[in-house]
């Protein structure tokens, strides 16, 4: 099992979209995938059609509840995609966590318990909030690796050093084995010179950390969640669908070749 935190403290860079569609593409490859919605906004849950009223066992319970919640099997993902949704309780969790003795380790402990033994997931993807708060720290402490979506725009690299500093701190204090899974460029417009320049800069700065596959800006990707579908169900042949499939294969290749890069920023 591999636990991947999908994190970037900037909002609107494609964390949720990547959690849903990379998860769906891994599920399509026959992997058993659990998505954990760790953003109080609950966009992953909504985007997959799990309405607030039907979110019984949530990520709040996973962190602070008495019993470990049962993941919900989704109708999308061919029987391979599960979700632990978020509800608005999670908005207060950051404060409650501060008062807790094991504040950074709650998700870690929950995910090492019987929940995951029972269901035997291959991948757990955690959709983080747009902040470097205790929720994101919990995800990083629980994870084997962090995957960073980076929007292909002028300020793409800004803020990245702060994210890397947080990762370094988590390694020092709690999770020495934490890797960087990779940086994925999102919403790229390859006909646009600025987008090309940003990609070149990011590759020059971050080298092999950057996935070869880039996610293009594609309106089909942004439409899919309003139908409660992943891009693979909504429009599998779209540029966006193909890109998330290719990214999933690259993620699998990075592990299964054992070629996990010594990605230590
Ligand atoms: P985050 O979770 O980082 O805040 P989202 O995944 O919610 O970001 O994406 C922000 C917005 O951009 C959403 O409206 C989403 O539908 C849209 N979006 C994300 N990726 C793409 C893409 N590749 N092409 C077009 N729209 C996208
Ligand atoms: Mg989001």
Image (cartoon, helix red, strand yellow):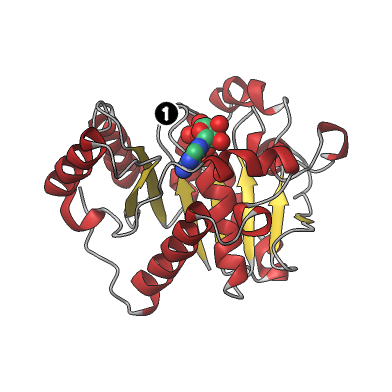
Residue that protrudes farthest toward the right in the picture: 53
- Quarter of image, res 254: bottom left
Q: Is residue 235 visible?
A: yes
Q: Residues within 10 Å of mark 1 (few under 14, many from 20)?
A: some
| For residue 127, above or below residue 101 | below
Q: Residue at 41% x, 29% y: name it.
A: 9
Does the beta carbon at disc 1 come under 8 Å from ligand 1?
no
Q: Secondary structure at mark 1?
A: loop
Which percent across, then down, holds residue 36? 63, 47
Residue that protrudes farthest toward the bottom in the picture: 257
| For residue 195, above or below residue 145 | above
Q: Residue at 72% x, 25% y: name it.
A: 88
Which percent across, then down, holds residue 14? 47, 39
Q: Residue at 57% x, 69% y: name it.
A: 122
Which percent across, then down, holds residue 121? 62, 68
Question: In front: 154, or 130?
Answer: 154
Q: Viewed as shown, does residue 97 lie left or right of 7?
A: right
Residue that protrudes farthest toward the front in the picture: 191
Which percent across, then down, holds residue 62? 69, 44
Q: Is residue 128 visible?
A: no
| For residue 121, above or below residue 227 | below
Please count the marks in the image. Answer: 1
Question: In front: 136, or 78?
Answer: 78
| For residue 234, above or below residue 195 | below
Q: Residue at 32% x, 54% y: name it.
A: 182
Q: Viewed as shown, does residue 166 lie left or right of 106?
A: left
Q: Which residue is mark 1?
A: 132
């Amino acid at each position: 099992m591999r636990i991947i935190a999908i994190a970037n403290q900037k909002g609107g860079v494609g964390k949720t979209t990547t959690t849903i569609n990379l998860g769906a593409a891994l599920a399509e490859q026959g992997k058993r995938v659990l998505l954990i919605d760790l953003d109080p906004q609950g966009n992953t849950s909504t985007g997959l059609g799990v309405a607030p009223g039907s979110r019984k066992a949530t990520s709040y319970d996973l962190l602070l509840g008495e019993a470990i919640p049962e993941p919900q099997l989704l109708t999308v993902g061919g029987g391979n995609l599960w979700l632990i949704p978020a509800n608005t309780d999670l908005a207060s969790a950051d404060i409650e966590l501060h008062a807790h003795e094991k504040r950074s380790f709650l998700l870690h402990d929950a995910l090492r318990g019987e929940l995951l033994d029972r269901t035997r997931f291959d991948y757990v993807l955690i959709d983080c909030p747009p902040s470097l708060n205790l929720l994101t720290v919990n995800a990083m402490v629980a994870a084997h690796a962090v995957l960073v979506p980076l929007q292909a725009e002028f300020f793409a690299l800004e803020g990245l050093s702060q994210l890397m500093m947080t990762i370094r701190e988590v390694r020092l204090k709690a999770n020495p084995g934490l890797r960087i899974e990779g940086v994925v460029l999102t919403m790229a417009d390859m006909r646009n010179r600025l987008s090309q320049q940003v990609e070149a800069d990011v590759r020059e700065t971050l080298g092999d950390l950057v996935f070869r596959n880039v996610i293009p800006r594609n309106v089909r990707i942004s439409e899919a969640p309003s139908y409660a579908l992943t891009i693979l169900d909504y429009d599998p042949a779209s540029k966006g669908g193909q890109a998330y499939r290719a990214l999933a294969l690259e993620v699998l290749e990075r592990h299964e070749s054992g070629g996990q890069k010594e990605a230590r920023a």
